[in-house]
Image (tube, grey):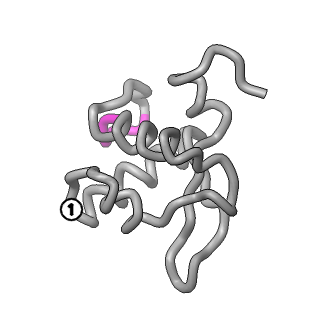
Amino acid sequence: MNIKDNLTTLSRSDYFILATLYSAKAFNGLTGMTQDEIRNNGVVLKRTAMYKHIKLLVKHNYMSECGKNGHEKVYCITKQGRLFFEEDVE
C-alpha cells in the first residue's frame, strides 16, 4: 500500500509480506510470525520500513496482531488477506 491512507493498492513489499505469511500458514496466533521471522524468510526491508508496511496492512485488515512472543508482536494473515491467494476462504 502506498503510504497515503486513501490508496488501497498493494505494493510489491506488501504483497511479499502477505505471501510470506501465507506460505508459512500463519493463520492464527500459534502459527503466526514476528517481524524478525518475516524478515528472516526473505523480505528485504529495513525494520522501520517493514513496520510501516505492517501497520498499514493491519489497518486495512489484510493481517492482524495475533499475540506476543516475548516482547515482539506476532502477526497472522486474515481472511481478507488470504483472498489474494485463495478463491474460497472459510
Q: Amino acid at mark 1?
A: Lys
Q: Residue furthest bottom?
A: 70
In front of the other: 10 or 41: 41
The span shown in magenta is 1-5
In the figure, 51 relative to 72: above or below?
above
Residue for point 58% across, 77% down: 69
Residue for point 56% across, 85% down: 70
Circle 1 is placed at which residue position? 46
Residue for point 59% across, 50% down: 26
Image x and y of residue 62, in percent: 55, 38
Residue for point 21% across, 62% down: 46
Image x and y of residue 18, in percent: 45, 40
Image x and y of residue 45, in percent: 22, 55
Q: Is residue 15 left or right of residue 32?
A: left
Q: Is residue 80 left or right of residue 33?
A: right
Q: Residue furthest right?
A: 90
Image x and y of residue 14, in percent: 36, 39
Question: In which quadrant will I find the N terminus?
Answer: top left
Queried whether the magenta region covers residue 85, the answer comes back as: no
Which secondary structure dominates the residues rendered in magenta?
Answer: loop
Q: Secondary structure at mark 1?
A: loop
Q: Residue furthest top?
A: 87
In front of the other: 33 or 63: 33
Question: In which quadrant will I find the C terminus?
Answer: top right
Q: Classify mark 1: residues with Cα within 10 Å, few (<14), some (14-19) or many (20+).
A: few
In front of the other: 73 or 8: 73
In the figure, 71 relative to 66: above or below?
below
Residue 65 quadrant: bottom right
Residue 78 quadrant: top right
Q: Is residue 37 left or right of residue 59?
A: left
